[in-house]
Image (cartoon, rainbow, N blue to C red):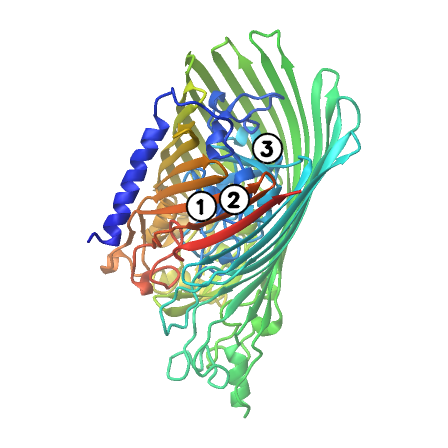
């Protein structure tokens, strides 16, 4: 009898073959209508990347754009949030749900083309969305990055997601090095609601979701759409039996409300508005502390409080707010758009099932039982962004075959704050080195010395011209000037063109320069935290740029990252039923900001001596220290036709990407210590924190009232570093390529009611097992590829009323 692995491989091979047959099947197969799936992106009107009032189809754009309708995803999808939904649709999009990574467990960061989450710009209805206040310090993905919390927006509120896979800083400003994601919200009339439930096959990680949308007319002049969502995600745990660890999905409870609409102020003008708010109560588990008989008593535990050991919980309360108010109309022959956008994100930490061992030890020394409070307010941080835009465009149909001219200006102000925790979360009550470690276990509170209120502002101006030289040849040029109050100015530019080589073939390419300003979070973040290196607790200071510790180490002032990007591709649409796109890209980034390794007495005695005068034993910093090069290929293909007289939609999405560190730039004070500044382990996090290849094959088959959807997702191999390192004879952690599959069935009870049930990762595939003492999260595998929880099952009910 064949093994499960053999059977799984046989099934997957047959699916790959079926996909190839479906995509490249005879054009004689009839198109039976518009399927609301990812494959429809090739026929959808594009907005992002072009400032024309009326834009081309996605297969006629000068740069690669995926436009992903979200209607079916919201009604029938097996994933309940935006980041995980896009993970299995968009070829170059990657979002990894972390575990054992402190605050990074509470927010799913997203990225494009193998780069960092802060090198992708996110827009909502074409307007810049703010990043989170969190900077990721741990986890296999997006270390040292800030990013945008995509899960703050409910799926039911979204019309489509447009992914511009090209450098676009000259058009949209900082962060758009890897590309731009534009989330377009719905304004359609009518009401609908979704209720969903899911859980892992092991019985945990229960998810409950209810969401409702209503679009209403404002007389005959406008619309207002309101979406409310409640999502309760249960904790999962994949730790081995008897372990003190809790490793898996964080517990999270989201309450979200979004409003989107417009109102005509004249025959050619309208007021538009968007507002959203989400509160999230989330909880992740820290490393376990041992009980009686372990080395953790009295240093990190109290026998009176947790005789059998304990697991601290890092609880975060996240508040996220977003609003845009604007007016779009005409001034003479020009289209004018004036807008004001507000974004705010705050995370406050509350640490439970914990203790401050120094308080417990002081109590014991004083004749008490040896206890401390078991819960602490550890402080937190916030980030606020205000963006003012004025944009103008005009189309000239008498210049050659058509010319669109656009220009505009932007003013942006930002504020970042760090708030201190209560004293018990950070004090060393019994004295340094006396016995009990100071600070709350699991997550130390922010100290008064960490408190920060940092501000900056920037101004920008841009010009953009799109010119149709002939019916076949189209060109685009853009230039942008941007000046920041804290580090100076930069000028970026972009050229793009497309040529219709044949009625069904389009050739396209672009060249651009770009930049990313250092985030306020990277410049000013300050904390003392406990990390576990090979199972041994180690206290580390992450010092802010420009502070006493960073200056003592000779760390220079942070500056912007600069990039050059080239894209060359083609599209092929032999029939209305078949579309294929292929795009090669090459992105070079200079002076990339990374989180350094830890400097201590073992690896740099002279620096450690200087730091000891400041009371610091081990420190790390943010620094412009590397140049990288990213090369890759994006491929999409879709086919819409019939099989056995029923509708079959097939799509393929593939991304191949390779990032390499090409140069390490060491400050003069750290010369000769390049291996500490960027260790092999940290380099591999940058180069292979995400898989270097990802492919999705999708089949949507509709027969009568029953619709079946099958997706096969392949994630390529990854190699990550270990704590000991290859220099000490410990091989790197190699994660083999893995392939999973999602399957669902939808039954249309009537035209207004659908019931969906199915499973994700139905073969229960998990990452390659490693040495838990050498992984970043202290478990037998890190959060890589598609996660570590295994198979899950779900059901959804959608009702329109």
The reply to whether residue 431 is visible in this rendering is: no
In depth, the one of 103 and 537 nearer the eye is 103
Tag 1 secondary structure: strand
Q: Residue at x 47, y 81 (%)?
A: 306
Whether residue 11 sits left or right of residue 73 in the image: it is: left
Q: Report which residue position mark 1 lands on.
A: 744
Quadrant assignment for the C terminus: top right
Crowd class of label 2 (few under 14; some 14 to 19; many from 20; radius 10 Å) = many
Rendering coords of residue 23 (x, y %): 36, 28
Eye-nearest disc, 2 or 3: 2
Q: Nearer the viewer, residue 335 or 513?
A: 335
Marks 2 and 3, how far apart at CA: 43 Å
Residue ID for mark 3: 482
| Image coords of residue 224 (percent x, y) | 72, 38
Residue designated by label 2: 76
Q: Is residue 638 above or below residue 284?
A: above
**Separation (CA) of disc 1 from disc 2:** 8 Å
Outermost left residue: 1
Q: Is residue 266 left or right of residue 26?
A: right
Residue beneath the point at 54% across and 84% down: 371
Q: Find residue 685 and report its horizontal and vertical position in percent.
A: 37, 50
- Dot 3: element: strand
Report the residue that reaches farthest toward the bottom: 367
In this rendering, position of residue 123 left or right of residue 66: right
Q: Return the mark for residue 667.
A: none
Residue 211 horizontal/vertical position (percent): 62, 49
Q: Earlier in the sequence, mark 2 or mark 3?
A: 2
Q: Is residue 219 left or right of residue 10?
A: right
């Amino acid at each position: 009898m064949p093994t499960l692995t053999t059977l799984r491989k046989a099934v997957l091979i047959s699916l790959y073959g079926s996909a190839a047959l479906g995509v490249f099947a005879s054009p004689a197969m009839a198109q039976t209508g518009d399927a609301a799936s990812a494959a429809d992106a090739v026929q959808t009107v594009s907005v992002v990347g072009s400032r024309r009032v009326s834009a081309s189809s996605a297969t006629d754009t000068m740069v690669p754009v995926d436009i992903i309708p979200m209607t079916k995803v919201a009604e029938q999808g097996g994933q309940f949030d935006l980041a995980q939904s896009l993970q299995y649709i968009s070829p170059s999009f990657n979002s990894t749900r972390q575990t054992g990574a402190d605050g990074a467990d509470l927010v799913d960061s997203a990225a494009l083309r193998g780069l960092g989450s802060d090198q992708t710009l996110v827009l909502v209805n074409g307007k810049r969305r703010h990043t989170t206040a969190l900077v990721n310090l741990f986890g296999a993905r997006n270390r040292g990055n800030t990013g945008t919390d995509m899960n703050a927006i409910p799926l039911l509120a979204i019309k489509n997601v447009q992914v511009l896979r090209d450098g676009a800083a000259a058009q949209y400003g900082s962060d758009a090095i890897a590309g731009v994601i534009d989330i377009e919200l719905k304004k359609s009339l009518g009401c609908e609601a979704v209720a969903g439930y899911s859980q892992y096959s092991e019985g945990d990680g229960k998810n409950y979701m209810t969401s409702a949308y209503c679009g209403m007319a404002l007389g005959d002049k406008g619309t207002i759409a309101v979406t409310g969502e409640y999502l309760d995600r249960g904790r999962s745990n994949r730790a081995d039996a008897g372990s003190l660890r809790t490793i898996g999905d964080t517990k999270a409870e989201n309450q979200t409300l979004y409003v989107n609409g417009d109102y005509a102020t004249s025959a050619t003008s309208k007021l538009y508005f968007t507002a959203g708010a989400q509160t999230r109560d989330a909880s992740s588990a820290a490393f376990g502390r041992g009980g009686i008989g372990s080395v953790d008593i009295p240093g990190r535990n109290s026998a009176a409080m947790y005789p059998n050991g304990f697991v601290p919980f890092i609880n975060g309360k996240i508040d996220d707010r977003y609003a845009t108010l604007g007016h779009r109309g005409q001034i003479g022959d020009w289209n004018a758009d004036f807008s004001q956008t507000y974004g705010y994100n705050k995370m406050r930490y509350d640490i439970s099932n914990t203790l401050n061992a120094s308080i417990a030890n002081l109590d014991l020394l004083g004749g008490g039982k040896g206890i401390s409070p078991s819960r602490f307010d550890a402080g937190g941080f916030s980030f606020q962004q205000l963006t003012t835009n004025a944009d103008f465009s005009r189309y000239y149909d008498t210049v050659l075959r058509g010319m669109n001219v656009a220009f505009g200006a932007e003013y942006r102000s930002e504020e970042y704050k760090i708030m201190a925790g209560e004293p018990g979360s950070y004090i060393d009550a019994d004295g340094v080195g006396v016995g009990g470690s100071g600070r709350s276990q699991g997550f130390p509170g922010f100290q008064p010395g960490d408190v920060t209120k940092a501000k900056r502002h920037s101004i920008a101006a841009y010009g953009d011209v799109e010119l149709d030289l002939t019916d076949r040849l189209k060109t685009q040029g853009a230039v942008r000037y941007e000046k920041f109050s804290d580090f100076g100015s930069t000028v970026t530019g972009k050229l793009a063109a497309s040529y219709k080589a044949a009625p069904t073939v389009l050739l396209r390419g672009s060249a651009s320069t770009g930049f990313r300003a250092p985030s306020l979070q990277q410049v000013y973040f300050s904390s003392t935290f406990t990390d576990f290196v090979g199972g041994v607790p180690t206290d580390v200071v992450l010092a802010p740029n420009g502070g006493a510790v960073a200056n003592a180490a000779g760390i220079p002032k942070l500056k912007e990252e600069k990039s050059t990007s080239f894209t060359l591709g083609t599209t092929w649409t032999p029939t209305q039923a078949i579309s294929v796109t292929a795009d090669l890209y090459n992105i070079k980034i200079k002076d990339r900001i990374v989180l350094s390794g830890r400097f201590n007495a073992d690896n740099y005695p002279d620096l450690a001596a200087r730091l000891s005068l400041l009371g610091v034993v081990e420190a790390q910093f943010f620094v412009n220290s590397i140049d990288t090069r990213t090369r890759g290929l994006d491929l999409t293909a879709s086919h819409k036709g019939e099989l056995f007289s029923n509708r079959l939609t097939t799509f393929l999405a593939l991304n191949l990407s390779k990032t390499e560190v090409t140069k390490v730039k060491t400050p003069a004070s750290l010369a000769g210590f390049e291996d500490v500044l960027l260790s092999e382990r940290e380099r591999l996090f940058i180069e292979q924190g995400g898989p270097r290849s990802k492919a999705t094959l999708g089949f949507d088959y509709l027969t009568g009232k029953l619709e079946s959807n099958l997706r096969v997702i392949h994630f390529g191999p990854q190699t990550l570093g270990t704590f000991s390192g290859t220099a000490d004879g410990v091989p790197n952690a190699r994660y083999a390529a893995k392939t999973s599959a999602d399957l669902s069935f939808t039954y249309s009870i009537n035209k207004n009611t659908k019931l969906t049930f199915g499973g994700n990762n139905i073969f229960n595939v998990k990452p390659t097992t490693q040495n838990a003492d050498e992984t970043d999260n202290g478990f037998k595998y890190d959060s890589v590829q598609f996660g570590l929880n295994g198979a899950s099952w779900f059901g959804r009910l959608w009702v329109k009323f």
